[in-house]
């Protein structure tokens, strides 16, 4: 199964010890799960986690960087990024989902959750993914 995790979910996982963290760790630890990233998505993860306003400790940043490096499958840059009028910053996630034929894109972003884009990927919240896979 191919899974993409939106930056807002990763940030929530890094900031708090709750359901987003459990879902991210479930995806990272699943042998049958490929956590999909692109160079652009990895860069966004790193930049967002390092924003001073979040005040993440260096140890926390290192932990998440190691986890991302160890358990991510970099599919490269998509040759095509669709136009996404609702929020152009979300287009790289849709492009990666299309390119990787992702089964799931886990997000808290309403623009992505309410998209009408014709893609096969199931765009779900953390709570929905947790329910579907019985993550508590």
Image (tube, rainbow, N blue to C red):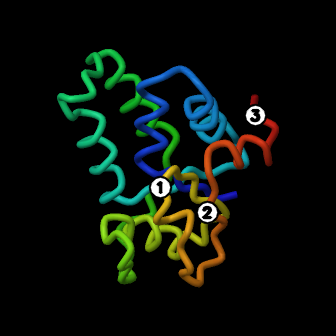
Would you name the residue on which mark 1 appears? 109
Q: What's the CA distance linking mark 3 and mark 1?
A: 21 Å
- Would you identify the image quadrant in which residue 46 lies? top left
Residue 126 placement, left or right of 13: right
Would you name the residue on which mark 2 appears? 123
Q: What's the CA distance linking mark 2 and mark 1?
A: 10 Å
- Assess disc 3: are there few (<14), some (14-19) or many (≥20) residues with their C-alpha within 10 Å of its C-alpha: some
Q: Residue at x 54, y 81 (%)?
A: 117
Q: Secondary structure at mark 1?
A: loop
Indicate whether 19 appears above or below 93: above
Nearer to us of marks 2 and 1 is 1
Question: Disc number at residue 5?
Answer: none
Query: Pointers 3 and 2 in contact (CB under 8 A)?
Result: no
Residue 35 spot, x, y in % from top left:
56, 50
Would you name the residue on which mark 3 appears? 135
Indicate whether 73 appears above or below 93: above
Nearer to us of marks 3 and 1 is 1
Taking the view exactly as shown, the residue that stands out farthest to the left is 52
Residue 119 spot, x, y in % from top left:
60, 79
- Assess disc 2: are there few (<14), some (14-19) or many (≥20) residues with their C-alpha within 10 Å of its C-alpha: many
Indicate whether 91 appears above or below 135: below
Residue 58 spot, x, y in % from top left:
26, 18
Residue 68 spot, x, y in % from top left:
43, 38
Mark closest to the chain's N terminus, 2 or 1? 1
Q: Residue at x 57, y 37 (%)?
A: 24
Q: Secondary structure at mark 2?
A: strand
Depth check: 8 or 68 in front? 8
Q: Secondary structure at mark 3?
A: loop
Depth check: 87 or 69 in front? 87
Q: Residue at x 47, y 55 (%)?
A: 109
């Amino acid at each position: 199964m191919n899974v993409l995790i939106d930056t807002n979910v990763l940030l929530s996982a890094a900031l708090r010890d709750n359901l987003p963290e459990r879902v991210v760790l479930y995806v990272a630890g699943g042998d049958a799960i490929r956590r999909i990233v692109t160079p652009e998505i990895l860069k966004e993860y790193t930049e967002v986690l390092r924003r001073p306003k979040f005040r993440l400790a260096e140890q926390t940043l290192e932990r998440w960087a190691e986890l991302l490096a160890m358990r991510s499958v970099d599919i490269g840059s998509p040759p095509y990024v669709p136009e996404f009028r609702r929020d152009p910053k979300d287009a790289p996630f849709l492009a990666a989902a299309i390119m990787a034929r992702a089964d799931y894109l886990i997000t808290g972003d309403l623009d992505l959750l309410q998209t009408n884009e014709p893609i096969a990927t199931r765009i779900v919240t953390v709570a929905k993914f947790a329910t579907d896979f019985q993550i508590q």
